[in-house]
Amino acid sequence: MTKQDIVDTVAEATGLTKVETEAVMNGVMATIIDSLGRNERVELRGFGTFGVKHRMPKKARNPGTGEAIYLPERHVPTFKPAKHMRLHVNDSLT
């Protein structure tokens, strides 16, 4: 499912136009990205929690050549699904 598929589905369910729905969706995504950029946690009850984890620098290997490479210190976005979401997905796919 793509972003456009989600916009189409939500627009049909809410009665909003696709342009309005896409504007709202872009606003939500921009707000989440901005919050993560400020190292804030974003919790959407019933959906999950977005956060940022700090990764220390480490030595790794290129699997093709076996050459050692060094990964720099970095911050990566994370997502932890809510219990309700995990249970729903598991029940739907079982």
Image (cartoon, rainbow, N blue to C red):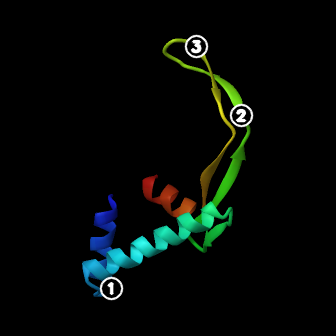
**Residue position for label 2:** 57
Q: Secondary structure at mark 1?
A: helix
Q: Quadrant of the N terminus?
A: bottom left
Residue 77 vs 50, above or below: the answer is above
Q: Which badge, 3 or 1, comes first in the chain's sequence?
A: 1
Q: Looking at the picture, which amino acid does disc 3 mark?
A: Glu
- Image x and y of residue 35, in percent: 61, 68
Q: Looking at the picture, which amino acid does disc 2 mark?
A: Pro
| Residue drawn at x 71%, y 29% as measured from the top left | 58
Using the image, tell me which numbered label, if any, was put on residue 67: 3
- Image x and y of residue 64, in percent: 48, 15
Q: Residue furthest bottom?
A: 15
Q: On the rendered structure, is 9 left or right of 63?
A: left
Q: Quadrant of residue 22?
A: bottom left
Q: Secondary structure at mark 2?
A: loop
In front here: 24 or 15? 24
Marks 3/1: CA distance? Answer: 54 Å
Q: Which badge, 3 or 2, comes first in the chain's sequence?
A: 2
